[in-house]
Image (cartoon, rainbow, N blue to C red):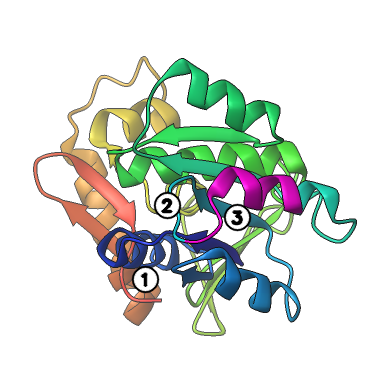
Amino acid sequence: MIYCVEDDKGIRELIVYTLENSGFKAKGFEDAKAMNLALREHKPELILLDIMLPGQDGISVLKGLRKNFETKKIPVIMLTAKGTEYDKVIGLDSGADDYISKPFGMMELISRIKAVLRRSGAIKDGDTIFSYGDIVIDIKAHSVTANSKHVELTLKEFELLTLLIKNAGIVLTRDMLLENIWGYDFDGETRTVDVHIRTLRQKLGKSGELIETVRGVGYKMGGAK
């Protein structure tokens, strides 16, 4: 679960929507008071915290989180329209794990969130089971299930699906997929990626709809959760 504390409703809803379509669970709050009430019931894996908030500002909220034994270890990424070095230093010195200035791209935000979660141990590079929607991949067993049914995949299809799920919400270009799955020396055309994606979608059935085409760019794991 990721909490997003942002008073701008449009930005807050966009962030929550993006997170939920990138494999995360998320809740949005317009101020610190609402988030603090939620903290009594559930501790999130990470908090996205805007600096300019009504009532109690983000820096004060952050300091309060770090002083509380139950919340002091929750990773926090500061969100703010301010981009000066001074504001960044204040945020980091107050205990923020990262800092991102508005306006920012959603893909950059997801990437930064995953980086912070890896550092905190919430996401481990050594994990062997990954899931997205109704798709579950077991790396050690080299098995895939979709909608609770076993799916037979070729090695390249398995590697392709694993890469997409590990980078859920991030657009991977055809060239990136070729380099990562087939190697730098692969002399085929990017059309081979499209063929494998089409076959992969067919084998995954309904869950295949989670693999989205980004026209003219590549593919990503998205779709309704």
For disc 2, the neighbor class at 10 Å (few under 14, some 14 to 19, many from 20) is some
Mark 2 touches mark 1? (CB < 8 Å): yes
On the image, numbered disc 1 is attached to which residue?
A: 203
Disc ID at residue 157: 2
Q: Is residue 132 left or right of residue 12?
A: right
Task: State the residue at coordinates (66%, 70%).
Answer: 36
Whether the residues at callouts 3 and 1 have beta carbons within 8 Å, the answer is no
Q: Residue furthest bottom?
A: 148
- 109 inside magenta stretch: no
Q: Give SS at disc 3.
A: strand
Q: Position of residue 97 (x, y in %)?
A: 65, 35
Q: Outermost residue, left direction? A: 216
Q: Main secondary structure of the magenta part?
A: helix
- x, y percent for residue 39: 71, 72
- Could you tell me which residue is drawn at 68 percent across and 64 percent down? 44
Q: Which residues are magenta?
A: 55-64
Mark 2 vs 3, N-terminal side: 3
Q: Earlier in the sequence, mark 2 or mark 1?
A: 2
Between the C-alphas of marks 3 and 1, the distance is 37 Å
Marks 3, 1: nearer the viewer? 3
Residue on which disc 3 sits: 47
Please name the amino acid that badge 3 sits on: Ile
**Vertical comparison of 139 with 102: above or below:** below
Q: Can the viewer see residue 127 in this picture? A: no
- Around disc 1, counting alpha carbons within 10 Å, would you say few (fewer than 14), some (14 to 19), or many (20 or more)? some
Q: Nearer the viewer, residue 124 or 102?
A: 102
Residue 98 visible in rendering: yes
Tag in front: 2 or 3: 3
| In the displayed structure image, the side of residue 122 where residue 154 appears, left or right | left
What amino acid type is highlighted by mark number 2?
Glu
Element under disc 2: helix
